[in-house]
Structures are given as structure tokens and as C-alpha cells.
Image (cartoon, rainbow, N blue to C red):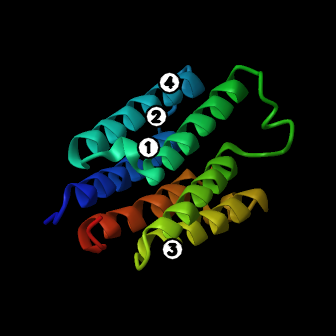
Amino acid sequence: MFKTGHMKAIFLWGVICLLGFGVWQFWQPADYFGMIHYAWIALVVIGTVGMIVWIPNILKHRIFRAWTAVNVVGMLVSIGTWMGIVPLFALGINYGAFWALIMAAGFAYTTTRMKGSIGYPVAAVLCVLVAGAIYLKMAPLMGLNWAFVPLGIASGAPLLYEGMFGKPG
């Protein structure tokens, strides 16, 4: 099914996006924000280890460094907001919109490096649209409180496509 380790790693990230944002949408433990951050850290570690194992010389790839920056900045802002250090909510910014925008930036960068791939530009555009819908408070109109399901689909489905049918990296 997978022509290269790169495609296997991209598919794994698609599963992680679908699973991770689905968990964020539907899992509500007592310490919700703390537990969800721990879950995401675990998912990011799994995805990163998959990339290191399946893609030769991955640590030298600019895309790897760009997505590492997206994940680190995203987690620092998210955890900082949860701890009351970063005023994300006070600025009127929703977690979902924030993540959609930084992921859109990551997908846009990936598009410049992976010429001819269709999944990455589609994911970038879909993530911007999801961020706009969240910002415009359209999530309740879609029947969702936080709109993490659309974000999971917008980011995960194109990665699943790239992992199965995209250009071998």
C-alpha cells in the first residue's frame, strides 16, 4: 500500500490528526485541558518517532523542522493558555482557530517543498476555511461547539490521501 516510508509517515499523521482532533472534540475528562495536552504530546511523539524511523535523514529536512516548529509553538501557546500565561481567549481567539491557522501555515510551507502534491494545498485552504468558520462563530451552525471535527477532517483527510496516493517523497 505504501510506496515509501515517507508515505507511511504522512498516512500516520493523517490518522493522528483525525484521532487527535476527534479526541479533543469528544473526550471530556475532569481535567480536560490538562489531559488533552498530554494526549496530544503523546500523539506528536508517536508521529515524530514514525517519521524518524521511516524517513532516512529526516532531521535534515526543512519540512520536518517546519512542522516541529508548528507543533512546539502550538503546544507552548496551548499549554500557556491553559496555565493562564498566554491570553489566547482574552484576545478572542479559539483553540480550534489558532490550531487551524498554524496548521494552514505548515501545509502552505509543505506545498512549496512538495511540488505536484494535491493534498497539502487542499489541507492549507481547508484549514483556513475552518479557522474562518470558527472565528465567525459558525461552529454552532455546523452542530459543533468547538469545530475540532472539521479541523480533524481538514487536516487528516488530505494527509491520508497523500499517504496512500501522493507522490513518494
Nearer the N terminus, badge 4 or badge 3?
4
Residue 81 in the figure: left or right of residue 10: right
Which of pointers 2 and 3 indicates the residue nearer the eye? Answer: 3
- Image coordinates of residue 164 in percent, x first then y, are 24, 68
At label 2, the amino acid type is: Trp
Evaluate if marks 1 and 2 touch, with contact meaning CB atoms under 8 Å apart.
yes
- Image coordinates of residue 37 in percent, x first then y, are 52, 29
The image shows residue 107, relative to residue 80, as above or below, that is below
Evaluate if marks 4 and 2 touch, with contact meaning CB atoms under 8 Å apart.
no
Label 3 Cα crowd, 10 Å radius (few <14 / some 14-19 / many 20+): some
Nearer the N terminus, badge 1 or badge 4?
1
Which of pointers 3 and 1 indicates the residue nearer the eye? Answer: 3
Evaluate if marks 3 and 1 touch, with contact meaning CB atoms under 8 Å apart.
no
At label 4, the amino acid type is: Met
Nearer the N terminus, badge 4 or badge 2?
4
| Residue designated by label 3 | 122
| Residue designated by label 2 | 40
Q: How far apart in space, not on screen, are marks 4 and 2 (Cα)? A: 9 Å
The mark total stands at 4
Q: How far apart in space, not on screen, are marks 1 and 2 (Cα)? A: 7 Å
| Disc 2 secondary structure class | helix
Evaluate if marks 2 and 3 touch, with contact meaning CB atoms under 8 Å apart.
no
Label 1 Cα crowd, 10 Å radius (few <14 / some 14-19 / many 20+): many
At label 3, the amino acid type is: Val
Which of pointers 4 and 2 indicates the residue nearer the eye? Answer: 2
Of residues 2 and 86, the one nearer the viewer is 2
At label 1, the amino acid type is: Gly
To which quarter of the image does residue 103 belong? Answer: bottom right
| Residue designated by label 4 | 35
To which quarter of the image does residue 32 belong? Answer: top right
| Residue designated by label 1 | 20
